[in-house]
C-alpha cells in the first residue's frame, strides 16, 4: 500500500498527489512514469512522474479527472492509501550536449514537461518555456516553470492571462524571428503535439513529444500502447513515452485513443450513480443520528 502524503488542487479537475514511494523515487528520472491502481480489481492507469525527491522518498504525480478511475482517484485525500504504485517505467530522457532548449506545454502537459526542463536548468542549459491553457484558472505549474526557465511565455485560449492564443502561435513566432534551439520539447494533447511538430519540421530542429496511448501492463506485453513512429511499430511503455515528433503518426494515435470512448462513458456514468447512492446513504445516516 502507498500513502498519499499531500494532495493539492492545481486547477478545476486537476489534482496533485505527493506519494510516499521511496523505492520509486530512488530510481526515477525525467521522462519516466508510474502505473497505479487504487484498489484490488481496479483499473491500472499510467501517470507521468511530475517530480521526485530521492532523499525524502517521494514521487509527485498530476492527473485530471476525466474518466471513472481518475474521478475516483480524485476523491482520495492526504493520509489515504492506494493499492499499487509501480515504477519508474519507460525510458528516461537525456540531453547530453544541449546549450539551448525550448519547452512547450499545453494543459496537463505542463506537468510532465517540468521535470525535463528542471534537469536541463540544473545542467546549465538555457531554457525557454511556453505554457498555456484554455483559461487562467486552468494554468498549472506556472511558478515551477518560471523557476527553471530563463524566459517564460504564458498563453491562454481566451486571453484571461498572458498572450491571447495558443502556445503554437508563440512557438511559430520565435522560430520565424530566427531564434535557434538545439531541441524543442512539446507535450500536451495529441493535436497540439501534431501541430507543433509540423511547425518545427521546416526548421530541421529535433522535436521531442511525449505520448499517452492506451496502456495496460506497462511492460510491453499487452501491445495496447503501440504507436507508429517512422516505419516502425513502437510500444510507448518500453520504447517511450518520448519520441521524435517528426516521425509519430498522430492521426493513428488519436484514433486509437478514441477506441473505448463509449465504454469509458458508461463506466463513468456507473461510477457517478454509485457515488450518488453512497452520498444519499451517508445523508440518511446523518439525519437518523440527528433524530436519535
Image (cartoon, rainbow, N blue to C red):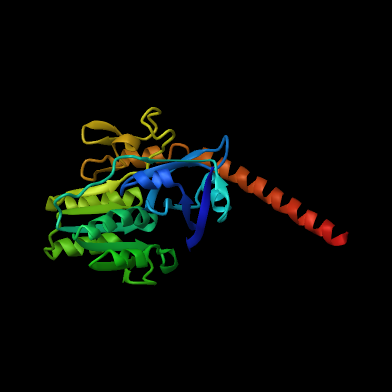
Can residue 230 be seen in this snapshot?
yes
Locate residue 217: give its quadrant: top left
x and y percentages locating residue 138 in the rendered image: 43, 63
x and y percentages locating residue 91 in the rendered image: 29, 40
Q: Is residue 264 above or below residue 58?
A: above
Q: Residue furthest right?
A: 292
Locate residue 170: give its quadrant: bottom left
Q: Nearer the viewer, residue 123 or 47?
A: 123
Q: Nearer the viewer, residue 285 or 232?
A: 285
Can residue 166 be seen in this snapshot?
no
Q: Residue furthest top?
A: 221
Quadrant showing the N terminus: top right
Q: Residue at x 20, y 61 (%)?
A: 172
Q: Is residue 122 above or below residue 143?
A: above
Q: Nearer the viewer, residue 97 or 108?
A: 97
Is 279 placed left or right of 148 in the picture?
right
x and y percentages locating residue 245 in the rendered image: 24, 45
Amino acid at each position: 500500500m502507498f500513502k498519499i502524503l499531500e494532495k493539492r488542487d492545481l486547477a478545476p479537475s486537476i489534482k496533485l498527489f505527493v506519494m510516499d514511494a521511496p523505492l520509486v523515487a530512488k530510481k526515477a528520472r525525467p521522462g519516466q512514469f508510474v502505473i497505479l491502481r487504487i484498489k484490488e480489481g481496479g483499473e491500472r492507469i499510467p501517470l507521468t512522474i511530475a517530480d521526485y525527491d530521492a532523499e525524502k522518498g517521494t514521487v509527485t504525480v498530476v492527473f485530471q479527472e476525466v474518466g471513472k478511475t481518475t474521478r475516483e482517484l480524485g476523491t482520495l485525500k492526504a493520509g489515504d492509501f492506494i493499492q499499487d504504485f509501480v515504477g519508474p517505467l519507460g525510458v528516461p530522457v537525456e540531453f547530453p550536449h544541449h546549450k539551448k532548449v525550448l519547452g512547450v506545454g499545453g494543459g496537463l502537459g505542463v506537468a510532465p514537461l517540468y521535470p525535463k526542463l528542471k534537469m536541463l536548468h540544473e545542467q546549465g542549459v538555457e531554457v525557454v518555456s511556453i505554457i498555456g491553457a484554455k483559461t487562467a484558472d486552468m494554468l498549472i505549474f506556472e511558478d515551477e516553470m518560471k523557476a527553471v526557465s530563463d524566459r517564460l511565455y504564458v498563453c491562454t485560449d481566451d486571453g484571461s492571462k498572458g498572450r491571447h492564443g495558443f502556445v503554437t502561435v508563440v512557438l511559430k513566432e520565435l522560430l520565424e524571428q530566427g531564434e535557434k534551439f538545439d531541441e524543442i520539447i512539446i507535450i500536451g494533447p495529441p493535436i497540439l503535439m501534431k501541430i507543433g511538430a509540423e511547425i518545427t519540421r521546416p526548421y530541421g530542429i529535433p522535436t521531442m513529444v511525449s505520448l499517452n496511448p492506451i496502456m495496460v501492463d506497462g511492460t510491453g506485453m499487452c501491445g495496447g500502447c503501440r504507436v507508429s513512429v517512422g516505419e516502425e511499430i513502437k510500444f510507448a511503455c518500453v520504447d517511450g513515452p518520448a519520441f521524435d515528433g517528426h516521425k509519430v503518426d498522430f492521426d493513428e494515435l488519436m484514433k486509437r485513443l478514441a477506441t473505448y470512448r463509449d465504454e469509458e462513458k458508461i463506466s463513468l456514468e456507473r461510477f457517478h450513480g454509485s457515488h450518488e447512492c453512497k452520498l444519499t446513504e451517508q445523508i440518511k445516516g446523518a439525519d437518523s443520528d440527528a433524530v436519535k
